[in-house]
Image (cartoon, rainbow, N blue to C red):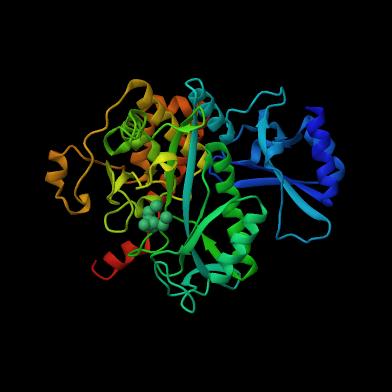
Amino acid sequence: SPETISAMLERIEQDNVKFLRLQFTDLLGLPKNVAIPVKQAEKALTGGIGFDGSSIEGFVRIEESDMVLKPDLSTYTLLPWRPRENRVARFICDVCKPDGHSFEGDPRYVLQRAMEDAAKDGYVFNTGPELEFFLFKVLDGRPTTQFQDGGGYFDLAPTDLAEDLRREAVLALTEMGFEIEASHHEVAESQHEIDFKYSDALHTADNVITFKFAVKTMALMRGLHASFMAKPIYGINGSGMHTNCSLAKDGANAFYDPDAPLQLSKTCMHFIGGLLRHAKAITRVANPTINSYKRLVPGYEAPCYISWSASNRSTLIRVPAPRGNSTRVEFRSPDPTCNPYLAFAAMLTAGMEGVREEIEPPVGAGNNIYHMTSVERDRAGIETLPGDLYEAHQALIADDLICRALGPHVVEALTNATNAEWDAYRTAVHPWELDRYLATY
Ligand code: GLN
Ligand code: MG
Ligand code: MG
Ligand code: MG
């Protein structure tokens, strides 16, 4: 409305902002932005700013490439690492077509649609992700896979040289409105995790994009590279983005029922049922790179079997111990290379089908499934997540519900991306092959 726009313009002036970054996300989950001088602010906030969408991954063909960025006023924040004079602020934008309608290829719109659908039954989807990443040394301006420290889980200085960086990142993110809950050294050398407070899925997806961007920037300023790649190094843990999920209804946590078994409501159990039913298709968007599948293997605290449990960490879905308002299910397959908008949209849609169709999940896995034989798993009806991107994409194509949630434009773009990526991978000669065959044959 005009009042909120003029209040926003006033705030921009008070903050001494001279540049505005208008940010959005492509289908690969990479942030894009255009900077405008503050003089253009009023125009941007009232009518939006036009741009050429034809060069953005997964957007549009050249002949229909005029797009408009409409800033979401609630996403205004200063960029704390930029100079304190002549400040830079950013907005996350919705991407619209010239006729003003939402653009089907905007991942933010995909998530908004899924959330509107859940709102029909009175539900708000809340997500809280746990992002893990590695800090690597940079040599001659290029990131390496050399560790920056030799620490391990919850280690502290002097092993943990990254303490200062985590501290700076936490301070910067706090200034940007994040509520940081914890930060710690992760299991692998040079691997870290910073957790921020859950929120509704749209806000959280925005936060995931901002988080990666901020952490990468802080690392760069210290001459380091922060990598969110899923499995940068064979033989040690990869980086996950466990996503804690819950539904709220009338302001209360709809997953909590003090009188139910495990104190988990029917809604919670059915949501788990829906997630499990569509787990394979969700994998395509939660684990979108060739490399993502090198993480989803036994032995590294990442899931590979489609199962749930109230406690053990070898399952795809775990229910963390807290109850009451903190009741949630932890979906453990996503990795931080995912487009969080698409991943959350797929998860919510699957979970909502579970709630609406009252899908009962199979009995929870009691034992550590990593230690079961494949025959034992078959007997227990425990299936495996897709083993590679190609298989995951086939599972997506076969899943009408998830395809409908993403919409035909996005599914077509993902199909093109998969085919191109898979062909490049399939035809490349990898170091592993040379190690294995060069000397022998
Ligand atoms: N890095 C592990 C993963 O890939 C998770 C480790 C943990 O947080 N316990 O999911
Ligand atoms: Mg964690
Ligand atoms: Mg972790
Ligand atoms: Mg976790």
- Residue at 20% in and 46% down: 366
Q: Viewed as shown, does residue 402 lie left or right of 180? A: left
Quadrant in which the C terminus is drawn = bottom left
- Residue at 43% in and 71% down: 155
Q: Is residue 182 above or below residue 306?
A: below
Q: Nearer the viewer, residue 371 or 65?
A: 371
- Residue 239 x, y percent position in the rendering: 42, 57
Q: Nearer the viewer, residue 134 or 414?
A: 134
Res 273 seen here: yes
Find the residue positioned furthest to the right.
Answer: 39
- Residue at 56% in and 30% down: 112
Q: Nearer the viewer, residue 355 or 132?
A: 355
Q: Viewed as shown, does residue 280 lie left or right of 344? A: left
- Residue at 54% in and 25% down: 116
Q: Is residue 419 above or below residue 355?
A: below
- Residue 83 x, y percent position in the rendering: 78, 61
